[in-house]
Image (cartoon, rainbow, N blue to C red):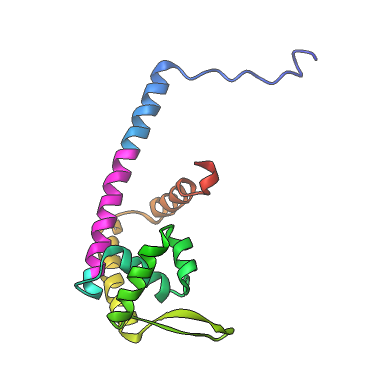
Amino acid sequence: MSAADEPADETPASAGETAALEDAVHRVEHELGRLFARIRVSWREAAITVHPDLQPLGYQVLTSIASGKATSAGAIIERLQTDKSAVSRHVRQLEQLGLVESIADPDDRRARVLVATPLAQERVALARSRYEARLSERLRGWSSEDLDRFVALLGDLGGSPEGS
C-alpha cells in the first residue's frame, strides 16, 4: 500500500483542547442536573394541580394514560422505565381518585385497558397549560433558529440508549 492509499492521520487534540472539552462537558452535566431538578419540581407542581395527594410519578402514569401512549400497566412500565409495583400502586391511587378507569379492551374483551376520566383530562390540561406558559415565558426571547437548533441538539443528546 502506498502512502497515498493510507488514511490520513488525525492529529490528537492538544492538552488545552482536551481540558476545554472536559470543562464544557462538566458544565453541560451541571446544567442538565439543574434542568432535571427543575423538571422534577414542575412534575410535583403539576401533580398537585391534578390532585393534592398525587405524587410526581403518579402524574407521569396519568399523563401516559391520558395521552393514549400507554394504556396498560405493561406499556406504562415500558414507557416510564419503572417497576411494576410502583405502577400498580399509582394506578390503584388514580382509580381511587376517580382519575383513571379500567375498561374492557375494545380489541380483546378478555384484556383490560386504562383510560383517563374526563376529570383527569381536564386537570391534566390545566397542569400542562400552566407548565407550557412557564416554558413559553422562558423561551420567548429565543429566535426560531435558536429553538430549532436547541431541538436538534436535544434530539442528538437524547438519541438511542445504545450510544450511551
Q: Considering only vertical position in the picture, is 95 above or below 164?
A: below
Q: Considering only vertical position in the picture, is 48 above or below 30?
A: below
Region of the chain picked out in magenta, as a range: 29-47
Q: Considering only vertical position in the picture, is 85 above or below 162?
A: below
Q: Position of residue 14 (x, y in %)?
A: 45, 17
Residue sitting nearer the eye, 40 or 154: 40
Q: Quadrant of the N terminus?
A: top right
**Residue 128 appears in which quarter of the rendering?**
bottom left
Q: Considering only vertical position in the picture, is 3 above or below 50?
A: above
**Residue 15 appears in which quarter of the rendering?**
top left
Q: Is residue 49 left or right of residue 79?
A: left
Looking at the image, which residue sits at the far top? 3
Of helix, strand and loop, which mostly describes the magenta segment?
helix
Residue sitting nearer the eye, 163 or 80: 80
* Residue 37: in magenta span: yes
Q: Write the residue at 49% across / 67% down.
A: 74
